[in-house]
Every structure is written in C-alpha cells, then in structure tokens.
Amino acid sequence: MKRLSLQRFWCAVCLVAFASTALYGCNLPQERSSPTFAAPETLTVETSLGEESPSGSGQPGLDVCSALSTEGGLLLGKGIANDLSYSPDGEWLAVASTTGVHIYKSQEVNEFRLLAEGRPVSRVSFSPDGALVAAGLSSGDICVWRVSDGQPIAAFLGHSEIRNLSFSPPDSTLLSWSRDGEVRGWRVPEGTPIKTLESIGAIGPVAFSPDGSRVAVGWGDSVRLWRVSDGTFQTFKSPGGTLQNITFSPDGEVLASSGEEKVIYLWEVGNGSLLKRLEIGPYVGVRDLAFSPDGKFLAASLEGEASRGERGAVSLWRISNGS
C-alpha cells in the first residue's frame, strides 16, 4: 500500500470551457477556478498499484481524480500521476500525469493550471529559482513554461521517452535523460543545445555537483563525470559492480558511490582517483547515500536480508578517516 498525505489540500470540483493553442506541441495553460470546501488539515489517500481506485475507475495505480470524501472533492487533477515536483519556495506543486501537467498553488488549491493538456507526461521539474517548469512528455518532447502566467517559452525535440529531467542548481541549464540512455543538455530559455552525451546503455543514478558545473552519470559499473559547460567528460570504472547510488559532497570535490558489492567508494572528482573504501558489514546493500551539510560525515541507508527478517540500518562515517 502506498500512502499519500498532502498538507492543506482542499477538494475542488469544476466544469469549465476552454480553448488551447500550442508552441511546438506544448499546449497553452488553461486557468481554472473551483469552489473550496471545509476539509481537514491533512487528507490521506491510499491505493495500491494495480488496484482499482476508490471511485472505481479501474485505472491501475493512483488515480488522482478519485480522492473523494464527504468533506471534500477533487484532488490533484485527472489521470494517473507519474511524477511530482514542488517549486523551491514551496508555492507551487506540479503533477505530471497521463493527461498533462497540473499546476497547483500549494496554499490555494482552488487555483491551478493545466499544461500540455491531453498529452501523457512522464517527468516534471522546476528551475532553481522556481520561475520555470519543464515537462518531459512520453513522446520524447520537452516543454518549458513560465510559472507566473503559464506561457510556453521553449520546446526541445528529438529524444525517445523522457525518463528524467533536472535543472542544474545555479542556473537554468536543463538536462534530460531518455529511455535509450541518451543524456542531453539545453540552455533555457534560449533553447541552445549543449553537446549530447552519447548513449552507451541504460542509465543508472545521476547527480549534479553543488555548483552545477558537473554531472555524474552511472552507466553499468562506470561513472562519467560530465562538464556541463562544454560536454567534455572523464570516465572511471567502479569496482563495486553496477552502480546504484551517486552523490556529491557539499564542496563538490568528493563523489560517493555504491553498487552491487557491499562497499561504498569515495572518489576524487578532480582526477577520478579512488580515495576510500567503506565496508557496510553484514548488510546486503545500500539504498541511499547523503553527505552532511558540512561534508564531514557520510550517511548510508543500509538494507538487511529480508528473507531472514533482518532490519536495515543507517550508518555514519567520518570522512576524514573513514570511521
């Protein structure tokens, strides 16, 4: 069972007429308003993947149109939600669904916009300043809108189905990953493409450096450090098998990775050399990695052997000595 708990989301129902235009296949926004209802502070929706939604629509997964109760109405648009993204300031929530991109004002659910109406959308992402929202369509197209008025400002074509989207932290460089393993960079809003990182197979974990100048991409048992400005990259092979997790230290000088082996590796970003091996002991794998804000500690979420009833754990290492 999956539980979705959304704060301050009141329920709304509306019927409106609308007109649409498009920019490179990206529909203009449709502004809607709807009455508000008294609702509890927290409204929880439960559904299981593959089960019918509470309204009996029969659609697999979470049908975000089906969250009805005696205290409220519609939650989060229509269709099946594929991805969610909050704007950095928390003001907006974007929902990528099978019917488009639904934009909600977090504190006032009675106001929202519908973008790329009627088109299946797989991924959605806000720019670092929250001024733009980008969506990856299942067709492989990428659309970018201005959040303030919903106007489409750019469209990028040529991918296969989009599997991930991410803006670099300090600016509006947009990176996209497609089903065929290709990574492309785009300058937004100019639409100028950055050199494509050629596909060499299925993409694993991806992480931006804190300053946005580099992106680490896992391909099988290798890491490629890609310089965003010019598309050049260096490659080094991880001895830990197929990569599952990658993260940068806060200063961007160290990269931590984990794979199929029960080891965490620390790499020097500047030259790709291996700095440390951190053993995870009796645990069977690493679920996630995170550096402390000061970069002195590395935390790892470790997975126990479920068949033996073993629990997972969170371990901390002091990076200075690996203890």
Image (cartoon, helix red, strand yellow):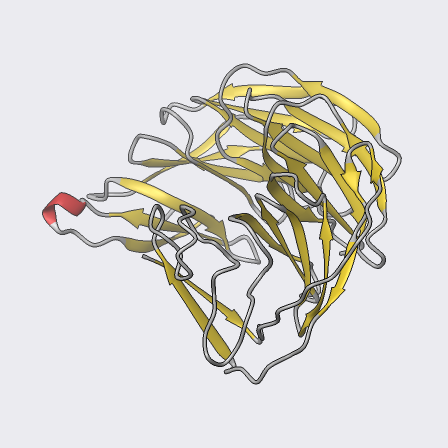
The residue positioned 28% from the left and 43% from the top of the image is 280
The vertical placement of 263 against 323, above or below, is above
The answer to whether any part of residue 204 appears in the image is yes
Closest to the observer, 272 or 74: 74
Q: Is residue 167 left or right of residue 82?
A: right
In-front residue for pair 122/255: 122
Is 2 placed above or below 22 here? below
- Residue closest to the far bottom: 38
Foreground pick, 126 / 302: 126
169 left or right, relative to 316? right
Q: Nearer the viewer, residue 223 or 188?
A: 188
Q: Position of residue 34 (x, y in %)?
A: 69, 72
Q: Quadrant of residue 78?
A: bottom right
From the top left corner, tell me how far across and down residue 79 is, in percent: 54, 50
Q: Is residue 45 above or below residue 218?
A: below
Tell me where residue 260 sits by quadrant: top left
Q: Give the mark count.
A: 0
Q: Seen from this angle, which residue lies furthest left?
A: 308
Q: Is residue 321 visible?
A: no
- Residue in the image at 79% along x and 54% along y: 18
Residue at 61% across, 29% down: 177
Q: Is residue 162 left or right of residue 322?
A: right
Residue 228 in picture, x, y percent from top left: 73, 30
